[in-house]
Image (cartoon, rainbow, N blue to C red):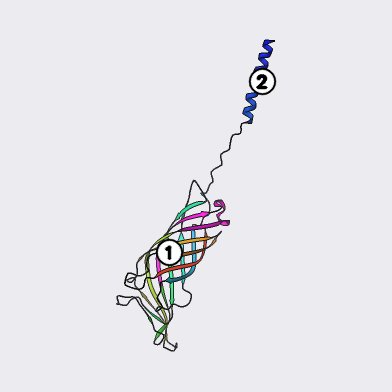
Amino acid sequence: MKKIALLSITCLLITSVFAQDSLTIVPKKKPPIDLSGRANDHFLLQLGYTGWAGIPDTISTSGFSKSINVYFMYDFPFKTNPKLSVAVGPGISTDNMIFKETFVGIKENSAVFQFRDQSDTTHFKKTKLTTVYLEAPIELRYTRDPLNSDKSFKFAIGIKVGTMLKAYTKNKDLQDKNDNTTNSYVMKESSKRYYNTTRFSAHARIGFGHFSLYGSYQINTLFKDGAAAEIRPYSIGITLSGL
């Protein structure tokens, strides 16, 4: 009887141990998210309106002054939070300010950049002042669904550092004071002497999928100290992104 009782107790103990092992739940590790092949705005095309903050009343702009920017960005997601990433890359930015019946003396020998009203004398019908920059944006990005960024809410904020490649004016159609065309031709002049050739801008984007709204604002002044008013360009518009 003792042997039978001992054998019964041993069987019960073994059964209890196996029962406890079978009830133990081993947590499964989440598989790592593979973002190596995702599309996350490596290419950006921006079209927008550009203006000058701080422009004096004596300078008269006209029409739709536009900004066109193209960037190629490299995106680096955070390992701890794939919804966040940092993006950097080169790009080209162009701003085109439109003036009417205004002399824009980009190549004048004056110490001050000349913007003169010529509505009561001979003038060009339209003058466009263009600046072209090589820029390097740095963005902190948030994507709600990093695996499907093409169909996800997005937000980005950052800074851009740029160096001026070119600044020029394009004057079209010479007119008399009564706006009658006296000579139809185009005159181009180029000079960077009045400009701060390095610029720093803050920018932000918000949108969904391939489309977003953007805004940018130049932190330092457009022109050198004493060369013109303390003007800071800004731009707002739409961004088409992909790849």
Inspect the image, locate mark 2, and give the three-letter code of the amino acid beneath it: Leu
Circle 2 crowding by C-alpha within 10 Å: few under 14, some 14–19, many from 20: few
Inspect the image, locate mark 1, and give the three-letter code of the amino acid beneath it: Ile
Instruction: Look at the numbered disc 1 and give the secondary structure of its residue.
Output: strand
User: Residue 231: horizontal and vertical position, in percent?
Assistant: 39, 70
Instruction: Look at the numbered disc 2 and give the secondary structure of its residue.
Output: helix
Of mark 1 and mark 2, the one earlier in the sequence is 2
Q: Main secondary structure of the magenta part?
A: strand
Locate residue 155 relative to residue 170 in the image: left or right: right
User: Residue 48: horizontal and vertical position, in percent?
Assistant: 49, 68
Residues shaded magenta: 130-157
On residue 12, the disc is 2
**Residue 133 counted in the magenta span:** yes
Which one is in front, 156 or 13?
13
User: Residue 28: horizontal and vertical position, in percent?
Assistant: 58, 38
On residue 92, the disc is 1
User: Mark 1 or 2, which is nearer the eye?
Assistant: 2
